[in-house]
Image: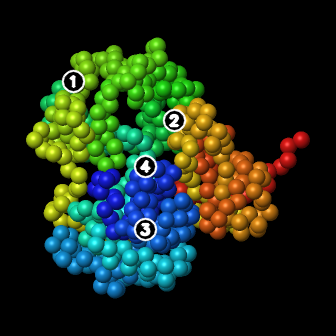
């Protein structure tokens, strides 16, 4: 996030796109809802479904799944046409505006209505509301990143924010909401194949030399594979032969599970380190028990870039060890020679090799969390990014054309399936489905159908239906609700017995290599009655 969680309530207008905020980020959603109720904030929701946040929205735009770039370009088209863009901000702090203006010129509200299904009048109102705000914030999540055009979607969000001068000030910003508690921290620490800590590029000779000196090893010049590339390389010449999976359950969370299952079963060796015996752990050659957040010391970095101290509160089960100790022992058995004795040894090294964390010591975190960048121990942390100038100097507009999703509706597969989360369950259900009260609240997957679609296909609420895509099929209970737009089926992905990812498309965004979880062409029919 460019801004802070507490800062979100300061926005005059908030635009939520690709985020079911009240169910995936309920604490953050309360900031927005409370501000709307107080009358200090206007809310725009762009989503294929009428999510709970739509109940509080001044404008809801239900786009056809996969058309986000067209919608955002359409908003920018109208803002430029009406002269509502921030001319001073663009002149002083950006470059590439002429190219953006030229590209979005064809994305008229009328054209965007044809592409996305959003009425032109509604798009104009949303654009004017956003552009006329003193401060406007954008919240997004995996609803715009899990596409073959996910990178383009994020660039378009940034374009809109810069166009209206909504970066580097309170109540504004581009604010991605992270899906798990330490996703931000894992990325900050270099758990990506092309960067070291703090996003220092593997391919940068200077950075690599610094890391080689700090670690006393020779490091490869070439970036590694991203997670989806790793799985897809199994069985190929010079492909991955062994995987070490920590705290992840890809045999529920990966797209196109039939393919993923085949790839994992084709490995020569699979190690899974987790707190429960997940579906992935069940097929592992070796399972290593880990500890939960309450059973270990360290830090988490949350969605607002805040590094927070985690302290051991209870002992873990017998045989479970700190994750870092397990990793160190494996590394040392392979000749690494690591000599960490305690968590503070690791924290000290983070400060030494990570410029944005240089001032974030465990001692300072005893008092309160700190937001990076925090370059030295006297620095207070950075609640808002890009104040005064961008890291690269001038902010760069990155105009992008709309491209269709890898699959669109067809005669054989006439509906569009999109997937997501429920408030009562979490990720692959490895924790929440073991919690009886939560399981009682949401015990099964329900496929949501718009009433008009349900009538067309002869489906009633509670029917068992078969959903089928080009990759697989599942049987699931139907739930008829106006929450889903016409032509859109929603299925949560938490449930192994009706796994949404048996159906989803594994086509990847060419840059991020994220699969297109959010758009799959699907057919539906009533399931055969079992004797």
Alpha carbons under labels 2 and 4: distance apart: 25 Å
The residue where tag 1 is placed is 345
Mark 4 or mark 1: which comes first in sequence? 4
The image quadrant that residue 385 belongs to is: bottom left
- Disc 2 secondary structure class: loop
Horizontally, is 250 left or right of 323 in the view?
right
The residue where tag 3 is placed is 43
Q: Label 3: few (<14), some or many (≥20) within 10 Å?
A: many
* Residue 27: image tag: 4
Mark 3 or mark 1: which comes first in sequence? 3
Q: Nearer the viewer, mark 2 or mark 4?
A: 4
Out of 157 and 224, give the one closest to the viewer: 157
* Residue 218: image tag: none
- Spot occupied by residue 452 in the image (x, y as percentages of width and height): 71, 69
Are the two marked residues, 4 and 1, in contact with CB atoms closer than 8 angstroms? Answer: no
The residue where tag 2 is placed is 249
- Spot occupied by residue 80 in the image (x, y as percentages of width and height): 32, 82
């Amino acid at each position: 996030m460019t801004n802070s969680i507490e800062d979100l309530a300061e926005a005059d207008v908030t635009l939520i796109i690709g985020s079911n905020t009240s169910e995936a980020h309920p604490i953050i959603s309360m900031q927005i809802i409370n501000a709307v109720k107080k009358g200090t904030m206007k809310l725009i929701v762009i989503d294929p479904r009428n999510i709970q946040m739509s109940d509080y929205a001044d404008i809801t735009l239900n786009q056809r799944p996969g058309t986000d770039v067209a919608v955002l370009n359409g908003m920018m088209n109208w803002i430029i046409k009406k002269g509502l863009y921030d001319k001073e901000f663009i002149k002083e702090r950006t470059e590439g505006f002429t190219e953006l203006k030229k590209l979005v010129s064809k994305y008229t509200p009328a054209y965007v209505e044809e592409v996305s299904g959003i009425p032109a009048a509604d798009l104009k109102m949303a654009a004017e509301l956003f552009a006329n705000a003193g401060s406007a914030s954008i919240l997004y999540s995996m609803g715009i990143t899990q596409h073959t055009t996910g990178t383009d979607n994020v660039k378009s969000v940034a374009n809109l924010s810069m166009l209206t001068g909504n970066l580097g000030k309170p109540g504004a910003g581009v604010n991605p909401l992270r899906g798990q508690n330490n996703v931000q921290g894992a990325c900050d620490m270099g758990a990506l194949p092309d960067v070291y800590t703090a996003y220092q590029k593997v391919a940068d000779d200077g950075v690599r030399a610094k890391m080689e000196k700090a670690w006393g090893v020779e490091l490869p010049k070439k970036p590694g594979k991203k997670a989806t590339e790793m799985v897809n390389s199994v069985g190929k010449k010079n492909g991955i032969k062994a995987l070490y999976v920590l705290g992840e359950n890809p045999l529920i969370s990966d797209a196109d599970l039939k393919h993923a299952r085949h790839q994992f079963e084709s490995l020569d060796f699979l190690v899974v380190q987790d707190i429960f015996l997940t579906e992935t752990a069940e097929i592992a050659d070796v399972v290593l028990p880990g500890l939960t957040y309450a059973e270990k010391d360290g830090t988490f970095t949350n969605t607002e870039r805040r590094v927070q101290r985690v302290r051991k509160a209870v002992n873990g089960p017998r045989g479970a060890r700190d994750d870092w100790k397990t990793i160190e022992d494996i590394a040392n058995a392979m000749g690494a020679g690591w000599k960490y004795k305690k968590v503070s040894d690791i924290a000290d090294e983070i400060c030494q090799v990570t410029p944005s964390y240089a001032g974030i010591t465990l001692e300072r975190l005893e008092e309160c969390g700190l937001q990076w960048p925090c370059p030295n121990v006297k620095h207070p942390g950075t609640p808002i990014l890009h104040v005064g100038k961008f890291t690269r100097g001038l902010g760069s507009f990155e105009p992008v054309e709309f491209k269709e999703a890898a699959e669109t509706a067809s005669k054989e597969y006439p509906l569009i399936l999109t997937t997501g989360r429920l408030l009562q369950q979490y990720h692959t259900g490895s924790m929440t489905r073991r919690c009886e009260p939560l399981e009682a609240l949401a015990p099964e997957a329900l496929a949501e159908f718009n009433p008009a679609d349900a009538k067309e296909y002869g489906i009633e609420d509670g029917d068992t239906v078969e959903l089928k895509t080009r990759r697989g099929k599942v049987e699931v209970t139907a739930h008829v609700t106006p929450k889903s737009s016409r032509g859109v089926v929603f299925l949560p992905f938490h449930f192994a017995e009706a796994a949404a990812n048996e159906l989803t498309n594994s086509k990847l965004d060419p840059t991020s290599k994220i699969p297109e979880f959010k758009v799959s062409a699907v057919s539906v029919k009533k399931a055969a009655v079992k004797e």
